[in-house]
Image (tube, helix red, strand yellow):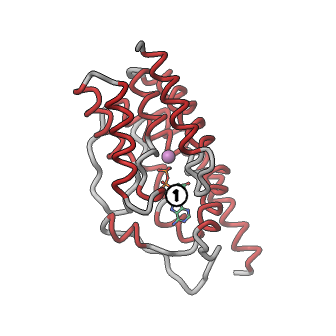
Amino acid sequence: MNKEELIERANLFVKDTLSDEPTGHDWWHIKRVVGLSEQIASKEGGDLFKIKLIALLHDIADYKLYEDEKEGVVKLKNFLNSLLPDQPLREAILKDINAISYKGANVAIDELSKEGQIVQDADRLDAIGAIGIARAFAYGGNKNRSMHNPEEKPKQHQSFDEYKKSKGSTINHFYEKLLLLKDRMNTETAKSIATKRHVFMENYLEQFYKEWGV
Ligand code: ADP
Ligand code: NI
């Protein structure tokens, strides 16, 4: 199977698996992350085949999508085993995908390849700005979280476990993740896009509190 065919197979697999996903990891998120990754790579370089594959598959094994966390990992491994005979490449891709997701404010960062860094930046860009705000409220609604609770102080988590268990309001999610992302971009290209999206979120919060009456 050539690289183009493999990307097409990955496209179909991901579209099929994530089309009805309600927590902000839907197919359109994946499409945006692929597009942003390509945009960043056009300035920063990197192997486009690897970048596209990581971008397409980065949320397939996400712990939030399954009752049993291991289910997603098995699904991802089976897919890669069936299509990609190059074992070192398979392992490199799995390692990057595992390292991409955000695990909490004060949790140590896993090492990523250049391609993994680009996809992580793209994924994080899609979590901030106008779309990031929409995704956060969609996620909060799906999990029955309150929109805002002025009596609840935001937390900066010390471990991934603590972050995973957090059931705070969606406004608090801005402080535990969204507002921290602009300083955690790997590439200069993503930093510059993130700066604009960050300002938009700050303005949004200012208006939100004004309307809330504080
Ligand atoms: P990504 O797919 O970008 O790695 P996540 O898997 O962490 O992001 O989450 C998917 C989307 O849901 C993101 O936009 C994220 O900010 C949002 N989200 C995750 N956890 C929460 C939460 N506790 N409250 C509100 N939104 C959340
Ligand atoms: Ni994602």
Residue 51 x, y percent position in the rendering: 42, 28
Seen as rendered, the residue at the extreme top is 2
In the picture, the quarter occupied by the C terminus is: bottom right
Percent across and percent down for residue 157 are 37, 69
Q: Is residue 16 above or below residue 2?
A: below
Q: Residue at x 55, y 27 (%)?
A: 39
- Looking at the rendering, which quadrant does residue 186 occupy? top left
Query: In what quadrant of the picture does the N terminus appear?
Result: top left
Q: Is residue 95 left or right of residue 7?
A: left
Placement of 190 over or under 53, stated as above or below = below
Q: Nearer the viewer, residue 190 or 51?
A: 51
Instruction: Write down the residue under mark 1.
Output: 178
Q: Disc 1 beta carbon < 8 A from ligand 1?
A: yes
Residue in the picture at 29% in, 22% down: 85
The percent coordinates of residue 14 (x first, y second) are 52, 37
Image label count = 1
Q: Secondary structure at mark 1?
A: helix
Nearest the viewer among 151 and 66 is 66
